[in-house]
Every structure is written in C-alpha cells, then in structure tokens.
Amino acid sequence: MFFINMNALVAMAGMIAVLMLTRWWPLNKRVLLLFFNLAFLGVFSQKLFLFAVVYTALNYAGFLFLCRTASYRKLWFVLSIVLNVAAVSCVRLFVMEVWTHPLFDAVIWIGLIYYVLKVIDAYYFAYFLGKDAKAPALDFFNYILFVPTFTSGPILKFRDFMADTKKPYSINAAQFEEAVKRIILGLFKKIVLVTWVSTAFDHVLAGELHTAQSLFLMVCFYAWVYFDFSGYSDIAVGIGRLFGYTIPENFKKPFLSPTLTQYWRNWHATLGDWFRDHIFMFFSRKTPSRWTAAGLSILIMVLIGLWHGFTVLYVIWGVYHGLLLALENLLGSTLVNKKKVSKPYFYFRCFLTQLAVLAAIIIYGGTQETVLRIYRGLLSF
C-alpha cells in the first residue's frame, strides 16, 4: 500500500539519505529508525499510531516478563500467545462488522495482521532462550513497527532482526545499485504489470463466463497475485537493505516447485516458514512421523486460511491445500530432486503443482458470489 504512494516513497528516500549522511554515528539506524517509524505511522493514521504504540508497549512488557520469570513459564508463554490471537480475532470481527465501535478504524487491521506474527515469534524466542533473549525497547519497537514490511511482509524473524541491529550502518555502491534495481523491478510489477493484468481480469469478468473465460480469469488472477505480492516484496527487500536491515526473500522461484510442499517453501516463503516453525515447534519438538506431519500440514494450512479471512471459502482453501500436503507426506513424496530425475519428469511435476494451486487461487479473487460465478463458468461449455 505504501509503496505506490509518492509521499511515502519520498519519505523513505529521505530516511535513506539521512542514514547515509549519519553513518558515522553507531546508533543511527536504530535511533533514527524509531523516529521514522513512529512519525510515518503518526502521519498515516493517528488511530493506528496510538494502537501500534500501546500494542507494542504491552507486548514488550510481556516479552521482558517471560525472559525473566522462572515460574509457570509455559503457562505465561501460552497465555501471551492466546491473548494476541484473541486480539487479532476481535479486530477481524470488527473488519467483518460483526462488532462495531466508533473508535475502530479498519486501518488498525492492516498493521495488526503482521504485528501479531512478529510478536509471537518474539515470545517464542523469549520462552526458549530466557534471559539471553532480552532486547532493548528501542530495538523491539523497531522490529514490530518496521515500516518497509508493514502491510504485506516479508515476515521478519526476531533473532535475525536483533542480529542486524548490532551491525553498523554500511552500504557500498554495489549494494546500493542492487537495492535500487530491486525497488524499480518491484514498482514495475505493482504499477505496470498489475494494472495490465487487473484490467484484463475486470474486462473478462464483466462478460458472460464459460469454460475458456473462467480458465483465463483463474490464470490471470494467479498472475495478478504474483506480480502484486512479489512486487511488494521486491520493494520491501530493496528499501530494507537501504535502511540497513536484511529482509528475507518471499518468493524463491515458486513456479519451479515440483511438489506442493516445495511450493509453499517458495511462495510467500516467510509466511509458510512462520507457521511451520511455530506450529511444528509447539506440537512436535522431534522429527514427526508421516501421520503427524500429515495432520500438522492440514492444521497449518487451515490456520493460514483463517489468517487470510474468517470465511467458509478460506477454510475450504486451507483444507484443500492441507489434504494435498498431507497426501504428499503420507506417500513420502514431499521432495523431488531436480538432479536425480529427468528434465521432462521434473517439469511435468512442476506443471501438476501449478494446476493444483491454480484450482484454488481464485478464492482470493473477491466476494463469495464472484468466486462461485467463476467456478460455475468452468462447467459451462
């Protein structure tokens, strides 16, 4: 959202210039970043600013408590997670207008949807490392409020961000050039390609739908999601690097994934990694059996579906992907090594994976009425 707003881009460019001019100051990328994050959110939305500061402060207090306490650690750990999940669920109900209140602003949801994942990761870090996990309030606030990954990730890991804070701000000409090229690529995807694809999608959707039109809409929407989301990730990676922080890759050649398991390690990789890391860590500390892995796959994909939205369609999407992943686990076919199989077989498996994803991608495509209309069109020859 921010990255197609000229004022936001100018503000970030100004911040990068300030960081470069103050690189002699060891604390520049920590102290100045906090001022920038707070000022940016304050200008964008006063309600969001107030919510973000209070939410982060409360969780920092909980984080420090979990680092220091020795009594009932597991209880406090679970309670912290439950409270955060309850908070995001309540806000989701406000967005759905199940609940209403004049103080609520939907923009709060934009921040919280990714805030909560980072907060929970910090709690995991505190629970397993104890006193060694302690972090200054300055860095904790920067981690949660980090503007370049604010609305759509990639999702930062607490330990990686804390490691970056200890490094002085440093960027050479080659790194600067690479980051700027990455930002330009992302802007081209979001502004040019997304505009072309979305225009074609809307044009076809406005007409009568038969099999060919519905298939076109599904492929078109798949491209739309990819260009939009990978474009955002490209910009976030580039700006994050210019801010002095390493942002993880979110898209790792997902179209060359020969299994659905590998696909979800390459498509929105940080979200899939987050759910795998935290769910598997919580329910299975040891290497799980095939049946356990299959059950956890279903659970993880249903949770990812609910994370996107509290609707029947998202639950169906989660169950669909979960069952396919579970089947791969039970059959022992979660991985295909490109070096050990023929090229035709490898690319055929990649094609089958894309078909499996394509079959459900349109669920992201709008209202339930629109989605069902496209599916009905598939059966209209």
Image (cartoon, rainbow, N blue to C red):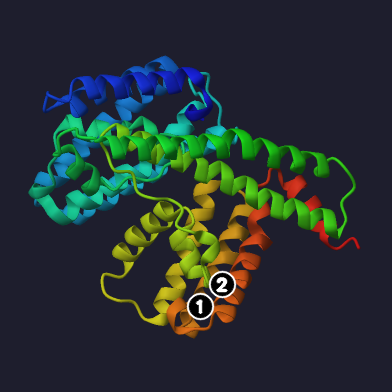
Residue 189 is situated, as x and y percent measured from the top left of the image, at: 56, 40
In this picture, residue 377 sits left or right of residue 165 = right
Q: Quadrant of residue 129?
A: bottom left
Q: Which mark is residue 15?
A: none
Residue 300 is situated, as x and y percent measured from the top left of the image, at: 45, 62
Q: Name the amino acid type tagged 1.
A: Glu
Q: Nearer the viewer, residue 191 or 128?
A: 191
In this picture, residue 222 sits left or right of residue 297 = right
- The crowding category of the residue bearing disc 2, from other C-alpha atoms within 10 Å (few below 14, some 14 to 19, many at least 20), is some
Residue 199 is situated, as x and y percent measured from the top left of the image, at: 74, 37
Residue found at the very far front of the displayed protein = 173
Picture quarter with the C terminus: bottom right
- The crowding category of the residue bearing disc 1, from other C-alpha atoms within 10 Å (few below 14, some 14 to 19, many at least 20), is many
Q: Secondary structure at mark 2?
A: helix
* Residue 310 appears anywhere in the view: no
| Residue 291 higher or lower than 208, as above or below | below
Q: Which residue is mark 1?
A: 328
In this picture, residue 159 sits left or right of residue 203 = left
Q: Which residue is mark 2?
A: 324
Q: Name the amino acid type tagged 2.
A: Leu
Q: Residue at x 30, y 62 (%)?
A: 282
Q: Secondary structure at mark 1?
A: helix
* Residue 39 appears anywhere in the view: yes
| Residue 319 higher or lower than 140, as above or below | below
Q: Nearer the viewer, residue 25 or 180?
A: 180
Q: Quadrant of residue 65?
A: top left
| Residue 264 higher or lower than 161, as above or below | below
Residue 276 is situated, as x and y percent measured from the top left of the image, at: 38, 62
Q: Are marks 1 and 2 in contact (CB under 8 Å)?
A: yes
Q: Residue at x 36, y 36 (%)?
A: 177
